[in-house]
Image (cartoon, grey):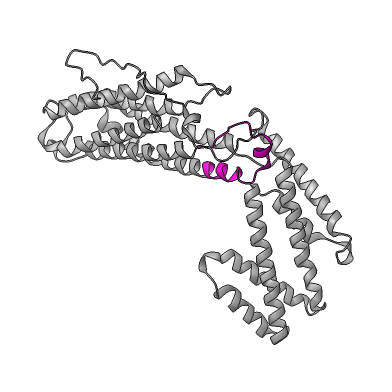
Amino acid sequence: MRRAIPQKGQTCQHPVMQVSTIWPLRALVTTTGAGCARPAGRTGRRRAGHAVHGVKSLTAALLAWGVVAPWSPGGRPYLAVATALIMANAPTVYRSVTQALHSVVARLAGLTLALVTAWLLGSTAGSVAAIAVIAVVVGPRRAVDDRLQIASTALIALAATTAAPVGGLVAPAVQTLTGAVVGIVVNALVLPPLYLDESDSAVRSLARAMGTLLREMGAGLGERQLAARAHTWLHQARDLEKELVGAEEQVRQADESLRWNTRCTAHARRKDVTHGEAFRTLRGVFLQVRGIARTLADNAHDDHTDHHLGQQFLDQYAETLRLAGTAVEEFAEPRPTTGTPDAASRERLRGAIDGALTWHETMTDLIGRGTLTKPGAWHIYGSLMTDVERLLLDLDHANTT
């Protein structure tokens, strides 16, 4: 149903729609598997993180030494301990498993390459050249790190064949495999890492930054400072891309940290979330914010005076941007820690979206009747109105699903 359009001299009312059940940020995001318990509070998180890494490192080192020392040559399982330390401190349990697989496969491939080369050519310069050609040149270009690890392992193993029997090269491979298993087990059982709070904070910060810029543009247009501040707004909009990239990385890491995480199983009754869906909504909002800033900057310094936007339009558009900025900021408001719906937050968000949509429809109607437009700037009006419409519809869709 189309909202009522206020006539001249009337104020716009923004009633809260009773049929919507709008959730704040936490309810808009997607769940990934079972819920996981978060560390309590944020105070002292860094110190706690250092302490956990220290405990995990010590545990992994002692276990690797205890398991491998009895059968390792000379009782020195240094390779197993080093591998266990790396795997135990991987950013996520999933990453520790994948890193271990890559490392073990690369080392086994390098060992196999060294054994075959030594058997065919002996420990000669020709063997070194063959290893370099096979390991570095052959294979997919995207696996550069793996190929270099294979080559380095093969060269070390080739050098070892000059001082030890070929059969003695199997021990380092077994040490690597054992250390990797120990490191994975420690990382999975001793407070496996989670990044839900970091994802929450990054997405919320991104929404607030975009909402603030929209409100600043609205305030600037209302104060008739388009020419003076347009390029500043454009630079700020482009700078938002850094926050966008950072938030995307945090969301990806949070999703990854939930995979194979034992804390998810131990606290299955909780329903924590990452923020992939909310981030995708904000990524679309970012494109519209940047488009609005670019259009305003281009128009502010357009040499064709007949293309300049009318002041009456800018005054109306300023209010639309202020309301849109408020809607984006309300989108970032967290749900209460108790997990119960917050009616006030839903009403504020619904009211902000409805208010911006009402202003948008008001302006669309005025432009359609030719009240706010200059004929030469019709394409600019269309661009600005389309951008804000897409922005608001993205928010509205995210909050009604």
Is 90 placed above or below 400 here?
A: below
124 left or right of 275? right
Figure quadrant of residue 198: top right
x and y percentages locating residue 276 in the rendered image: 48, 40
x and y percentages locating residue 350 in the rendered image: 37, 22
x and y percentages locating residue 281 in the rendered image: 40, 37
* Residue sitting at x 64%, y 27%: 41
Give, as a single range, the part of the protein colored magenta.
250-275
Task: Work out whether residue 37 or residue 245 is closer to the camera in this orientation and state it.
Answer: 37
Figure quadrant of residue 285: top left
Q: Is residue 308 visible?
A: yes
* Residue sitting at x 71%, y 47%: 187
Q: Is residue 311 visible?
A: no
Task: Work out whether residue 385 or residue 177 is closer to the camera in this orientation and state it.
Answer: 177
Q: How many labels were placed on the picture?
A: 0
95 left or right of 373? right
Is 51 placed above or below 12 here?
A: below
Residue 357 highlighted magenta (yes or no)? no
